[in-house]
Image: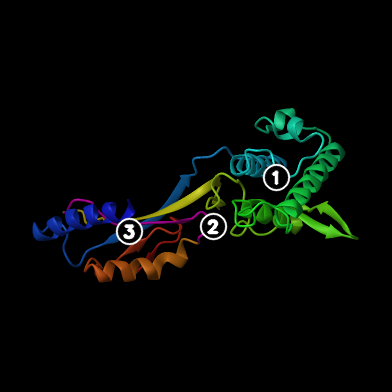
Amino acid sequence: MPGRRHRLLDGLLGECQTRGWLKRGGRQRTDATRVLGALRQLNRLECVAETLRQALNALATMAPSGCGPRSPGWFDRYGARVEDARLPTSPDARQRYAEVIGADGRHLLTAITAPEAPAGLRESRQSNLRRVWVHQYEWVDGHLRWRDPKNSPPPAQRLDTPYEPEARYGTKRTTSWVGYKVHLTESCDEDSPHLVTHVETTTATTSDVSRVTPIHDALARHDRLRDSTWWTLPTSARTHW
């Protein structure tokens, strides 16, 4: 549990303060690095198909008697894990396939929100399906159309996988990933042990600089705010506090 981990860190640092290994004054530095989500990274077409497949599997669990919407071709399209190697390759064919998936998802969403739908489906785990369909499709002249990538939501809002909804697509300098970001602060005096004094995990899209004040506040609450801190955000532009 996160609370237990924090208690362990707080206890360790308290002992280090008592022994004089963590003193007031001196330097600290903070930087952030990627944390990969425990997931398979998907492209847009894989994401919509896998989201619909997850929704159908959840529906089958909730309604094992078979109640719920059915459509020709669904088993062929969503019976097995969706992988790009088995999807159409030409841009036009991929566009058509995306719109077939879009129509399937709309059909499912309409069915599970209908008044005659089984109780509980409206509050079921189909929220991911709704979010992805809003993110990846739009209505054009009364038809559901695959969004142009330039018209997609920003990464901070976009759901890139149905299996870990909190994970986000992040980029830091030349590195890109889907997952989270961890901000680590450590003491860095030459004559003392280098100790991690604060750990904070955020979404992958969180700006490093935006966490400076919250991390300072957290350090101050635990009497760990040093007289000077080096922030390596980015490494080429350090700020001295």
Q: Residue at x 61, y 59 (%)?
A: 157
Q: Position of residue 161 (x, y in %)?
A: 60, 46
> Disc 3 versus disc 2: distance between alpha carbons?
21 Å
Q: Position of residue 190 (x, y in %)?
A: 20, 53
Q: Are marks 3 and 2 in contact (CB under 8 Å)?
A: no
Q: Residue at x 74, y 57 (%)?
A: 114
Residue named by callout 2: 205
**Residue 36 magenta-drawn?**
no
Judged from the image, the secondary structure of the residue bearing numbered disc 1 is: helix
Q: Is residue 218 above or below residue 105?
A: below
Q: Position of residue 43 (x, y in %)?
A: 67, 41
For marks 1 and 2 on the same chain, the one whose residue lies earlier in the sequence = 1
In front: mark 3 or mark 2? 2
> Disc 1 versus disc 3: distance between alpha carbons?
41 Å
Lateral position of residue 78 relative to residue 64, left or right: right
Task: Compare residues 78 and 179 and report the one nearer the observer.
Answer: 78
For marks 3 and 2 on the same chain, the one whose residue lies earlier in the sequence = 3
Q: Would you call the spot at circle 1 few (<14 residues within 10 Å), some (14-19), or many (20 or more)?
A: many
Residue named by callout 1: 48
Residue named by callout 3: 29
Q: Which residues are magenta?
A: 192-206
Lateral position of residue 213 relative to residue 192, left or right: right
Judged from the image, the secondary structure of the residue bearing numbered disc 2 is: loop
In front: mark 1 or mark 3? 1
Q: Position of residue 68 (x, y in %)?
A: 71, 44
